[in-house]
Image (spheres, helix red, strand yellow):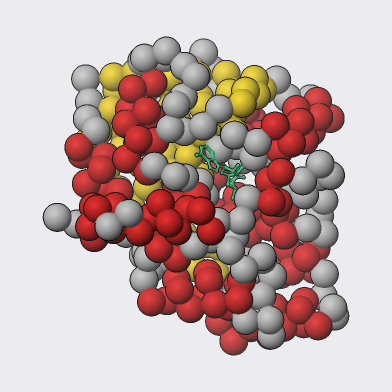
Amino acid sequence: MCDYELALEGEILHHAYDRIDNSMYQAENDQWWQPDSALFLLKTFINPVRVGYFAKKLFNGLNIDPHGSTALEVGCGGGIFCEEIARMGFDTTGIDPFAQSLQIAIKHAETSGLEINYKQGTGEALPFRDSSCDVVFCCDVLEHVRDLPKVISEISRVLKPGGVFCYDTINRTWISKLIAINIAQRWGWWAFMPPDFHIWKMFIKPDEIKLLLQQNNFEWREHRGTAPNVSYPEILYYLHKRAKGELTYKDLSEKLFLIESENLTIIYMGYAIKKQ
Ligand SMILES: C[S@@+](CC[C@H](N)C(=O)[O-])C[C@H]1O[C@@H](n2cnc3c(N)ncnc32)[C@H](O)[C@@H]1O
């Protein structure tokens, strides 16, 4: 039995879920698209690597034609990744549990001149028919959900046979505890996120997600890691300057971003194909 199943058995994860802080997603004002906000780092810090990786796999590796194909983003928030999916040429839908984030996403798509269908819903109960999507994306979301096995089984249900599931998430390692939890959220000298934005026990090991995918009628294909563009001492230097008020989130967003790497120990990406 893998660690994830053991953790579920002990109901540790349900307890952890109750601690997770979703308040940024429920804010009435725009927390997503303001260049000087923490969530905007999804656009500058993470989007370039994940958009590049998924485009390479979908269009060069799997020869998918986005025109006339449907894509769903599960957990789209304010639309930062969903807009990139629409720009790839897919007929795009985004769902999220929080109405406030969806309102921001709808307004922003209008200003971007993009047609995106936004809908309220959760990954655990996707409001779509069986075998109705060509591609499902779930990025920076799997480590936030209450019931991960249910989300994976729902994604498998709505994908067409041969459809592709693309995801990124955070590994549960000592280094992810140090960097994504303690430095990013807890230790005030550097922290730039609320203390319970991510809960370490909800992070997912690559083998756990691989097993869940195989148990849900997927052929798992690949995991690929990420690394920062600068050294860790430089990151700490910039984060401390931000914590002191000498740099803004916008300044950070101009200095730091992720690149593709072999290193799966913190943020990693992957994809799987729904079996025929
Ligand atoms: C860090 S944000 C990522 C947003 C977007 N995917 C991106 O990368 O730009 C996490 C998102 O997961 C959503 N979320 C949390 N629990 C969820 C669930 N059970 N089903 C679907 N989405 C969920 C949150 O509302 C939030 O919008």
Number of numbered labels in the structure image: 0
The quarter in which the N terminus is drawn is bottom left
Q: Nearer the viewer, residue 259 or 104?
A: 104
Question: 210 left or right of 30?
Answer: left
Spot occupied by residue 35 in the image (x, y as percentages of width and height): 81, 55
Question: 147 left or right of 188?
Answer: left
The picture quadrant for ligand 1 comes to: top right
Question: 144 left or right of 235?
Answer: left
Q: Check the image and name the residue furthest to the left.
A: 1
Q: Nearer the viewer, residue 174 or 168?
A: 174
Spot occupied by residue 36 in the image (x, y as percentages of width and height): 82, 59
Q: Relative to residue 150, is residue 236 depicted above or below?
A: below
Spot occupied by residue 210 in the image (x, y as percentages of width and height): 26, 47
Q: Is residue 268 visible?
A: no
Residue under the image location 45 percent in, 58 percent down: 16
Residue under the image location 47 percent in, 16 percent down: 128
Question: 34 left or right of 125?
Answer: right
* Quadrant in which residue 163 is drawn: top left
Q: Nearer the viewer, residue 13 or 158?
A: 13
The quarter in which the C terminus is drawn is top left
Q: Is residue 200 visible?
A: yes
Spot occupied by residue 169 in the image (x, y as percentages of width and height): 45, 53
Residue under the image location 59 percent in, 60 percent down: 197
Residue under the image location 36 percent in, 71 percent down: 173
Q: Nearer the viewer, residue 159 or 22?
A: 22
Q: Relative to residue 89, is residue 22 depicted above or below?
A: below
